[in-house]
Image: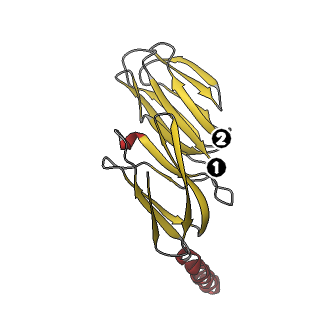
Amino acid sequence: MANLRQAALAFALVALLGYPARLKAGDIVGKVSVAKPDQSIVYLETVPGTFPAARTTVGQRNKMFTPFVVPVVQGSTVEFHNSDDLAHNVLGVGSDEFNLGSFGKGMTREHTFNKPGQVTLLCNVHPEMEAHVLVLQNPYFARPNGNGEFHLVNVPPGDYVIKAWYDRKVKKQNVKVPAGGSVTVDF
């Protein structure tokens, strides 16, 4: 029973100490005005700290990579899944070059992205297939919705460079994130 009380007290202390830290964050909201906003990514260039990697999936269906652009934190692994009735290849060109070879329907290959920057995904079997991976330093990124609206949440207060990636082009602005509330940035 004493261990249970100690655990409950420790949990309450962590929750209490962590609560003010969560209050000291702001949000960035805005809009990207491009033809296909859901094929763009808005992200912060650099945020102090280190951030955990994750796993995500890129599909191959109807001779297309989906999604068209994928943001990942450096060190993350992307699984490539082939849903077509024919073989595909995944070839990465850019900051992190690789070739996963050809693989058939229902098969998955993966690659861990350790070098920051942009990587263009190609299929050497089907030259019309193209997509992009943005390997970022931090997880403060968002894919705008169909109306171009985006929302970055719980950003530590400070001065940052915010970027909007669309069709291999990058636009950037400076932004000051408040300790609470939100700031608006439009591209």
Question: Could you classify mark 2 by the number of other residues whose Cα lies within 10 Å: few (under 14), some (14-19), or many (20 or more)?
Answer: some
In the rendered structure, find residue 123 and report the number of the disc placed on it. none
Depth check: 166 or 57 in front? 166
- Pointer 1: what residue? 137
| Image-quadrant location for residue 12 | bottom right
| Image-quadrant location for residue 100 | top right
| Labels in figure, total | 2
> In the rendered view, how is the structure colored?
secondary structure
Q: Amino acid at mark 1?
A: Gln
Contact between labelled residues 1 and 2, with CB atoms less than 8 Å apart: yes
Position of 6 compared to 183: left or right? right
- 135 above or below 182? above
| Residue 54 placement (x, y as % from top left) | 57, 47
In the rendered structure, find residue 116 and report the number of the disc placed on it. 2
| Residue 43 placement (x, y as % from top left) | 53, 51
Element type at mark 2: loop
- 165 above or below 119? below
Q: Earlier in the sequence, mark 2 or mark 1?
A: 2
Q: Which residue is pictured at 68% across the width and 38% down the height?
A: 115
Question: Could you classify mark 1 by the number of other residues whose Cα lies within 10 Å: few (under 14), some (14-19), or many (20 or more)?
Answer: many
Depth check: 25 or 58 in front? 25
| Residue 96 placement (x, y as % from top left) | 65, 31
Depth check: 115 or 41 in front? 41
Please identify the quadrant where the N terminus is shown: bottom right
Element type at mark 1: loop
Q: Which residue is pictured at 48% across the width and 12% down the height?
A: 125
Q: Amino acid at mark 2?
A: Pro
- 49 above or below 115? below
| Image-quadrant location for residue 184 | bottom left
Q: Which residue is pictured at 42% across the width and 61% down the height?
A: 29
